[in-house]
Image (cartoon, rainbow, N blue to C red):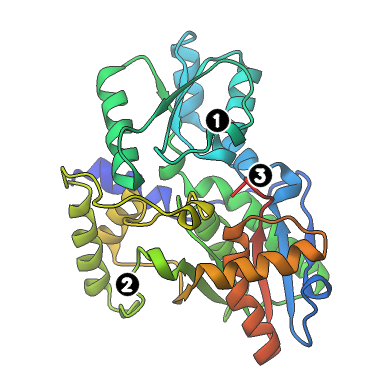
Amino acid sequence: MTHARRVELIEAFSMSRVRKIYNGPLVLTDLGPALKLNQGRILGLRGDLLGSLKFPAYEEMLASERIRALLRDHPDWPLFDGVALSGIEALSFFACALGRKLVVVVPWEFPLHLATIHGEVEIIRADEPRELGYVWKMAQVLRERKNLIPVNQAGSPWALAPVGNRVVQELEILGIRPDATAGVMASGGCMYGIQKKIAEGFSGTETILVECAESSTFDSSLDLRDKEAVKAFAEEKLLGYLDHDPPAFSLSAKDLLFFPLHVDLPNRLWLEFLALTGKVPFDRVVKVSQDAALQVQGRLRKAGFDFGPTTAMALVPAIEGAEQENKTFAAVVYGKGKD
């Protein structure tokens, strides 16, 4: 690995360097009444009221020196990224505002009929399913087309750190010190930019990674304090991205409800960071079944909150911690189709 690559990875996943505080709309909702908790508290950061958290994230990415320079030097080049539902809505909004065409790669499983799209967008679907097919297609596009401006959300978890700083500020104003945060992880933006920022702001706050029990990508038995073991895990997983064979079986209809959570391999850039540092951003991994997540989603819908299944999955250990141990949790919540 080159020195430049090492620096790039460390800066991408380093949250302490980001001091900016997001000054846009932000709402924390006590979900306890909706969930009828008998004790404890769950505060939901309402990503659904922002459209999605991809909006402030892409706003930060597009304001970076790298992107501004590329936009200035190449006035006719389209923006480019790999996206799911919330990403295509947010990035197409900003591309339209900039007067730029947008080129995106979407996963093979992408539900195009649910997408909200602004302006001129070229959508390229992966030829093969899951993370491998998605990464293959992105690499192919970048090899064959040199006149694109890669925004690279997968390598920009820092872009949500201003939102994380704002959440810490709001919690301090409210006089609330969370015992723990719980969240799922795909690109890593919420895990690093929000959950890690909360952990930095409140010492002793536990950070929990929630994974789907039926399609987990992280070894929950791994000693997270053993950096060499974490490095070895990451190096082994990275070999999966070198595989030349498509997955042996397709995702089920229930699996697709939890799109865009990864089902085989974690974010490749994050794995490179782990292989380099051996440092994970969470304290433990909790696996939640799809059925348990869908039950929580049903409870929330009865109370008028139409959150997505991945939100419900993250809330399962939060509910258990609140009701069984009287703990205060913070979690990011999304609207349906905005995960």
**At 70% from the left edge and 60% from the top edge, which residue is drawn?**
167
- Residue drawn where x is 32% and y is 80% of the image: 221
**Residue 307 falls in which quadrant of the image?**
bottom right
Considering only order in the chain, which callout, 2 or 1, is on the residue closer to the N terminus? Answer: 1
Residue 175 % position (x, y): 80, 75
- At label 2, the amino acid type is Asp
Is the residue under label 2 in contact with that under label 1 (CB below 8 Å)? Answer: no
Q: Which residue occupies the foreground of this view, 201 or 286? A: 286
Q: Amino acid at mark 3?
A: Ser
The alpha-carbon separation of the residues under discs 3 and 1 comes to: 16 Å
- Nearer the observer, 161 or 148: 148
Picture coordinates of residue 196 (x, y %)? 53, 64
Residue identifier under label 1: 62
Confirm whether residue 251 shows in the render. yes
Residue labelled with disc 3: 52
In the image, residue 91 sits, relative to residue 311, either above or below, namely: above
Question: Which image quarter: residue 23?
Answer: top right
Q: Mark 2 = which residue?
A: 219
Mark 3 or mark 2, which is nearer the start of the sequence? Answer: 3
What is the crowding at mark 2: few (fewer than 14 residues within 10 Å), some, or many (at least 20)?
few
Does residue 211 appear left or right of residue 244 in this picture?
A: right
**Would you say the residues marked 2 and 3 are in contact, meaning their CB atoms lie under 8 Å apart?**
no
Nearest the eye: 44 or 61: 44
Residue at the bottom extreme of this rendering: 325
Is 41 located above or below residue 30 in the figure?
below
